Amino acid sequence: MLRLLKDICSNARCAIRRRNGLVQLVAVFGLSFVLAAPQAQSDEPIYIRAGTLLDGQGAVREDVIITVEGSRITDISAHAPWVTYDLSEFTVLPGLIEGHQHINSYFAETDMFGSMDSPEKRMSHMIENAYVSLMGGVTTLQSVGHESDLELRSAIERGVLPGSRILTSAGVISGGTPDEVRQRIRELDAMGADLIKLVVSGTLRDGAERINSDEWIQAACGEATALGLRTLVHAHRPAETRTAILSGCTQIEHGGFLDDEIFALMAERGIYFGPNVGVLQQNYIENRDRFMALGFTEEMFARMEAVLPQILEMFKRALRHEALKIVLTADAVAGTHGRSPDELIYRVQRGGQDPMDAIISGTSLAAESVGLGDTIGTLAPGMEADLIAVRGNPLEDITAMRRTAFVMKGGKVYRYEPPRSPGR
């Protein structure tokens, strides 16, 4: 564990100290937090005082005590025999649920998936990405996805590594005949995939044109539905998106060129929508030189820069459809793991989304979209104890979502940044 943290620190510019049996990481910029690395669940109840509590479904409570026993929340009330963690200066809310990441993406020498690197090196970066995501407040992420995600998912579930809980598609399906795609979906199901990732449009940097037929989409969505698997569809244009919706697929990603008619259909059918508004394309542009070294071209960057206003206007139109289920999906690739809050911030500041709606999109609604609405995404008795605390009130200043001070997942504390002393 300590060796892993040292490796992570070499990239994150921090130092490691031991104190009272815990591992403390101290960042160069002066902040510190404590990692319980990773601890056994306490035999005694944990009492957490929340200055402000956002339950993930729209309710706000002040000065309450959250009681955690084992991995679950057992009570939220005004009293407790003592306080284990005093978060009275913070806003406490459910851990974020990021619906679209590529946990295996990093800046390798030849591409952003390390295809020429050793399996050991690729896995070390995946571990780092899962860790950084957790420290940024994402307690559950959906990786779409690679077969290697399955091993990382298992290791995190066993409690031997600190990282976000992982759901994975274990692969991406973008071609083949209808019969071949049906067979591939059955193989992924047998491997233990949590969902199926389908690609029916190209990327924005390549023009986002359609790449698969109606017959292909119908075969893929139909097979996944027959197996009881959720389907996340990479789509940008109305025609192929409509086919995916009518064929039974459950979530549409990206949607750069979708229109009001499609949004209305998605709302009517209860389809989830995961737009990427504030992080994905911006990250490519911010890291232009690094992506150029991986084979991106000037033409690709020109397309991405040109489409940014279109994406923002698309998102604003989507918001006008009140019944549309918009969820948090930053599509994290190399350079963006740990930045899921930035997606919410951009949606509120630039897109005009209500802050509470943005938080719900990354908590209870996101939990519903991944099939875990009765387990995570809401702070209530009986729910899994996945919760974070941020400095400030994100309903008043959405940038507070960047200032994570506490992370608990499944009743285990992975980050605790104590309250600052007066005057600091």
Image: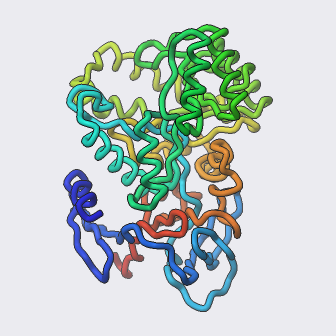
Q: Please, is residue 178 above or below residue 35 in the view?
A: above
- Closer-to-camera residue (103/149): 149
**Would you say residue 405 is visible in this rendering?**
yes
Q: Residue at position x 29%, y 20% from top?
A: 296
**Would you say residue 396 is visible in this rendering?**
no
Q: Residue at position x 32%, y 43% from top?
A: 123
Q: Residue furthest right?
A: 268
Residue 185 appears left or right of 301 = right
Instruction: Give percent across and percent down for residue 285.
Output: 33, 29
- Tell me the quadrant of the picture where the C terminus can be found: bottom left
Q: How many marks?
A: 0
Q: Residue at position x 57%, y 9% from top?
A: 177
Instruction: Give percent across and percent down for residue 168.
Output: 51, 39
- Closer-to-camera residue (305/291): 291
Instruction: Give percent across and percent down for residue 271.
Output: 71, 32
Residue 163 appears left or right of 322 = left
Q: Please, is residue 227 above or below residue 96 in the view?
A: above
Colour setup of the view: rainbow
- Tell me the quadrant of the picture where the N terminus can be found: bottom left
Q: Residue furthest bottom?
A: 81
Instruction: Give percent across and percent down for residue 314.
Output: 59, 26
Q: Residue at position x 29%, y 28% from top?
A: 115
